[in-house]
Image (tube, rainbow, N blue to C red):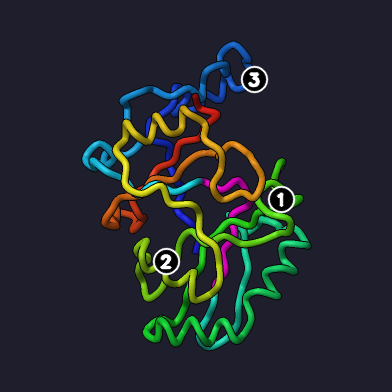
Amino acid sequence: MLYPKINSLWKRQGWYLDEGKKHNRDYQAGRQSFIIGDYACEEFPMIKKWRVEEKIDGTNIRVTIYNDSFIEFGGRTDDAMLPAHLYKYLTQTFTPGLKELLFKLIPSATKIVLFGEGYGPKIQKGGGNYRDDVGFILFDCWSGSRWSTRQELKELAVLLNLPTPYDYGLMTEEEIIELVKSKPNSLTAVRPMTIEGVICRSEPLMIANLDNRPIMWKLKCKEF
């Protein structure tokens, strides 16, 4: 199971790439610029307040835990290769004992997928500012054919002794934009660094019916 794509708040000038002009620098300039007010998903303007969390700059990780067999590690796609030091950390962290604990917590599930970010030294540029060693920060969970609420996820993280991204609380779209424009320092990192951006989810949890994805969007500081 792959994690759903997280759209930006608005569509971009190059929402549909013209292959015939792909290598024309003049055309490509500004292609990623936002079309302010043209929302990437029709649900976005209907929601007045969002649950806002810090976006972590790392590598997307899936930990798939099967009730009757094994624990499987994957990246953003099925072909993604995990860094060796991160893979070693994951195998040492997600043990059979942790698997047993998970299925005691969620006995109705036959498969649990933990979604998080592998982060730390040698993961992304500046990754060592987050922490001194490699780690896994939990940001979502799929179990029993449904997505966890934010409260359920935080409770799960405490029981598994895993960190979660910093939670800014509930904010309006205007407040979120001002926050990102201000380029605040990370409240997840152990050393001063500007946040990569934010992830904004509906509160309470809302699901898009067609593809069963949580309604959410992202903004990055570099966009402003």
- Name the front one of labels 3 and 2: 2
In the rendered image, which residue does mark 2 sit on? 153
**Numbered badge on residue 23:** 3
Where in the figure is residue 123, as x and y percent of width and height? 71, 50
Q: Which of marks 1 and 2 is nearer the N terminus?
A: 1
Name the kind of residue labelled 2 in the image.
Leu
- Residue 60 falls inside the magenta stretch: yes
Residue closer to the observer: 154 or 1: 154
Q: Earlier in the sequence, mark 3 or mark 1?
A: 3
In the rendered image, which residue does mark 1 sit on? 123
Q: Main secondary structure of the magenta part?
A: strand
- Residue 90 falls inside the magenta stretch: no
Q: Is mark 1 on a helix, strand or loop?
A: loop
Task: Identify which residue is drawn at 57% across, 18% down.
Answer: 28
Residue 132: tell me if it is visible.
yes
Name the kind of residue labelled 1 in the image.
Ile
